[in-house]
Image (spheres, grey):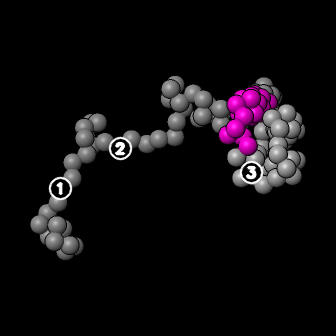
Amino acid sequence: MALTASQMIDAIHKSRGFISKAANLCDVSRQTFYTYLKQYKTVQDALEDERENRHDFVESKLMALIDEGNVAATIFYLKTQCKQRGYVERYEHSGTEGSAIQFVVTTDEANGDR
């Protein structure tokens, strides 16, 4: 059975951009769906648009939780979207007064003795 671009686009919308579900709706394998997908630029564009819509939807749910004062949602947002402002979980190690860490290997350690 040959898939048309309109069938695929309809399945993409119904599946919210999840390929496995779209393939099931078209009654083809995921691999077959991908094969047809490569042939239709309009379907590729529809898939990208649907995934962007899904991302917007999920982000709106996250923002609603933040608006409600959900601390976990706020922390998640800060860690993922505000790294440039310093909201990261990263530890930097340094030597004395911020200098580089210096490693000294003795002859015994270099030979594997401890």
- In the figure, residue 40 lies in which quadrant? top right
Viewer can see residue 12:
yes
50 and 41: which one is in front?
41
Q: What stretch of residues is rendered in magenta?
A: 36-59
Neighbourhood count class around disc 1 (C-alpha, 10 Å): few under 14, some 14–19, many 20 upward: few
Disc 2/disc 1 C-alpha distance (Å): 17 Å
* 73 w.r.t. 112: above or below: above
Q: Quadrant of the C terminus?
A: bottom left
Q: Residues within 10 Å of mark 2 (few under 14, many from 20)?
A: few
Q: Residue furthest left?
A: 107
For the point 73% across and 43% down, the residue is 36
Q: Earlier in the sequence, mark 3 or mark 2?
A: 3
Q: Residue 48 appears at what percent x and percent y?
A: 71, 32
Measured as percent of width and height from the top left, residue 64 is found at: 80, 28
Query: In the image, is residue 38 part of the stretch drawn in magenta?
Result: yes
Q: Is residue 27 above or below residue 81?
A: below
The amino acid marked with disc number 3 is Thr
Where disc 3 sits, the SS reads: helix
Task: Compare marks 1 and 3 and give the one earlier in the sequence.
Answer: 3
Task: Compute the Cα span from label 1 to label 3.
Answer: 59 Å
Residue at image mark 2: 93
Q: Is residue 113 magenta?
A: no
* Residue on which disc 1 sits: 104
Q: Which residue is mark 3?
A: 32
Q: Quadrant of residue 69?
A: top right
Tally the marks.
3
Amino acid type shown at disc 2? His
On the picture, is 84 further left or further right than 97?
A: right
Which residue is depicted at the point 80% across and 35% down?
5
